[in-house]
Image (cartoon, helix red, strand yellow):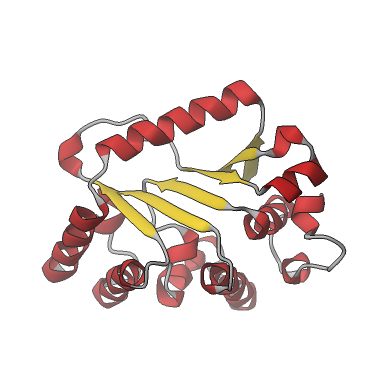
């Protein structure tokens, strides 16, 4: 709770129309020293454009435009942590499938690919792509995010919270903080990193995907 609340200051996300699990995650995300994320079917939330996020959100809130706007606004605000004075180290490993799915139409997807390239150019994120040619990989079942916390936060929350894994589900989310289970995800991330392209080659693949659109 100390990590989620960020001390005694009330978080902006606490009044947003988000699930309790996601509200807790946003608080933890803001306290993390490093964020390592793997996604297979969509661009990670911290790297999405507004148009891309709206296209995804419309699937979940087709008849509630007000809630859709509030959810997307919250997602855009989350992204501010990458540009704050002392941002967390952020790394995203993305399956090529997420780049091939044309979310929101060609124009929206092309803008999204350009946005990813801009994050690379600004050194705000390390982005690696797992190409189709790499074959099967250990992350094909689902995406996940690994958060690690700085020492002061660990002291406040206890040693068990030094690393936490967040896994989204259709109706909520799961947190993993047991040592053995966290270790399995850390090893999976290492394997996925080994199968991914280098940041430079990943940028080249993003540019090629943008060109073909």
**Residue at 32% of width from left, 73% of height from top?**
118
Tell me if residue 189 can be seen.
yes
Q: Residue furthest top?
A: 180
Q: Quadrant of the C terminus?
A: bottom left
Q: Position of residue 52 (x, y in %)?
A: 40, 70
Q: Is 89 above or below relative to 70?
A: above
Quarter of the view holding residue 69: bottom right
Q: Position of residue 197 (x, y in %)?
A: 23, 46
Name the foreground residue: 154 vs 28.
Answer: 154
Apparent side of residue 209 relative to residue 126 in the rendered image (left or right): left
Quarter of the view holding residue 66: bottom right
Counting every numbered tag in the picture gives: 0
Q: Residue furthest right?
A: 8
Q: Is 158 above or below relative to 75?
A: above
Name the foreground residue: 13 vs 90.
Answer: 90
**Residue at 18% of width from left, 58% of height from top?**
205
Q: Position of residue 11 (x, y in %)?
A: 77, 67
**Residue at 26% of width from left, 77% of height from top?**
107
Tell me if residue 141 can be seen.
no
Name the foreground residue: 189 vs 121.
Answer: 121
Apparent side of residue 141 relative to residue 195 in the rendered image (left or right): right
Q: Residue furthest front?
A: 151
Name the foreground residue: 186 vs 98.
Answer: 186
**Residue at 62% of width from left, 53% of height from top?**
32
């Amino acid at each position: 709770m100390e990590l989620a609340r960020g001390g005694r200051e009330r978080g902006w996300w606490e009044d947003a129309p988000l699930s309790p699990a996601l509200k807790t995650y946003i608080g933890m995300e803001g306290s993390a020293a490093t964020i390592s994320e793997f996604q297979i079917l969509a661009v990670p939330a911290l790297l999405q454009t507004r148009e891309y996020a709206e296209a995804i959100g419309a699937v979940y809130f087709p008849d509630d435009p007000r809630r859709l706007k509030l959810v997307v606004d919250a997602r855009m605000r989350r992204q501010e942590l990458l540009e704050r004075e002392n941002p967390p180290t952020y790394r995203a490993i993305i399956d090529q499938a997420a780049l091939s799915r044309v979310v929101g139409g060609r124009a929206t997807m092309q803008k999204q690919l350009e946005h990813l390239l801009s994050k690379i150019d600004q050194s705000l994120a390390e982005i690696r792509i797992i190409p189709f040619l790499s074959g099967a990989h250990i992350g094909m079942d689902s995406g996940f995010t690994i958060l690690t916390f700085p020492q002061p936060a660990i002291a406040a929350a206890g040693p068990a919270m030094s690393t936490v894994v967040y896994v989204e589900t259709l109706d909520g989310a799961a947190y993993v903080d047991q040592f053995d289970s966290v270790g399995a995800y850390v090893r999976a991330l290492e394997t996925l990193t080994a199968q991914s392209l280098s940041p430079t080659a990943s940028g080249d693949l993003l540019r090629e995907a943008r060109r073909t659109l």
